[in-house]
Image (spheres, helix red, strand yellow):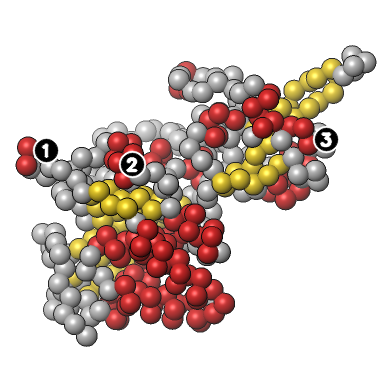
Amino acid sequence: MRQVVLPVKDENGFFEIRFESIGGLGAHLAGQILAEAGVLRMGLNGAHFSSYGSEKKGTPVKSYVRFCAPDQELRTTSPVLQPHLVAVFHEGLLRTEDVCSGIRPGGTVIVNSRRSPEEMRARLGLDEVTVGTVDALGIAVEEKSRVNTAMLGAVVRAAGFLDPEAVRETIRATFQRKYPHLVEANLRTFDRGFGELRLQAGVARDGVARALPAAGPQLGYLNAPLGGAIVNPGNTVLKDLSASRQGFLPAFRREKCVNCALCELACPDLCFVWADNPDRKARVRRVLVGIDYQYCKGCLKCVEVCPTAALEAVREVEGFAERARVPRFAPTAVEEGAVPAPAAAEVSAG
C-alpha cells in the first residue's frame, strides 16, 4: 500500500469534504464508500457521518468525510464547517441552502449540473475557488444507476489524492452484498463521473485567496423567538418545494386531459390548478388548467395515475418550471419579478 500524502490540510491536519444533497440521492452511502476506501484500502485515518432531519426523500442532507495521515489520531466528530471540497448533489439546493458556506481558500465546489463551469461560477458568484460541473443525473439515467456514484467519481478526480481503483473496489464490495446486479452499472457511472467532470480553476483577487464565512446557527440566546413561535412554517403559500425534486417533474398536456381529477386525488401537495369553464351550452364545468410547480416536489404520483398520458414525467431543465407554472394563489410581494403564468398554448405544449 503506497503512502498517501494529503494535498492540503487545515490547522488540525485534516482534509475535509462536505456533500450537500437531499434524501434519496444517496449522499450518505457515497460518503460511507469514500471513507471506507480511504481508510481500508489507502491506509489513511478517516471518519464519516451524516446529518439530516426527517429522513424523507427530498429533505436536505449533509454528509461529512474527514481524512488525515495514518499516524494522526482522528477524534473530531463535529460537522465540517470549513471544507476543502464541497459536492452539491442537487442544483436546486443553490436556491434554498448556503451550500458553499465556509469553503476554504483554494477549495473546490462540484455541482451536479449540465451548466458549464463558467456558467456555474457566475451563478455562485465565486472567483477564488475551483468550480466543477458534471451531469451526474444524466449519467445515472443513461446507466440505470444513481447520482451518488457519478458524484463520487467527480469527487475522486477533483480531490487528486484519492485512488480511483480503491473507490471502485469499495463500490464493488458494497453493492455485491445486496445488489450484485447493479455492480457494473454503478462502476460505469463512477467512471463516467470521473471522466466527464469539467473543472475551472479560480483566481484569487489581488493575489490573496479568502475563505467564505462559515454558516453559524440562525437562532441563539440573543435572538431566539418567544417559546412556541414557528418562524419557518412548513406549509404556506410562500413555501418553495422545487429543491426537493430529484431531477424530474410532470409536464401537462392539456389536449389529452379529460378532467378526471385522479391527479388531484394522488397529489400530496395540492399542486393542480382548476378553473370554471363554460361549454358550448353555457354549462359550467371544472377543468384542469395547469400545475403550480412551486409546490411540486416531483413525486410523480400524478403521472402514475393519469389514464390518458396527459401528465408525462420529463427531466427538469432550467426555467421550465417557471415558464409552465400556473400560480395556485395570487402573486405575493415576495414573488416580485416572478415569471407570469404562461398562455394555455404554452402549458399545453409543455
- Please tell me the numbered disc located at residue 120: 2
Residue 22 to residue 39: above or below: above
Judging by the rendered image, the residue that carries numbered circle 1 is 205
> x, y percentage for residue 348?
69, 30
The amino acid type found where label 2 is placed reads Met
Residue visible at 19% across and 82% down in the picture: 2
* Image label count: 3
> Horizontally, is 60 left or right of 82 in the view?
right
Secondary element at image label 2:
helix
Which residue: 68% across, 36% down?
252
Residue 92 in the image, given as x and y percentages of width and height: 44, 43
Q: Quadrant of residue 151?
A: bottom left
Per the model, the C-alpha gap separating discs 2 and 1 is 18 Å
Which amino acid type is marked by label 1?
Answer: Arg
Q: Residue at x 22, y 76 (%)?
A: 44
Q: Which numbered marker is on residue 258? A: 3
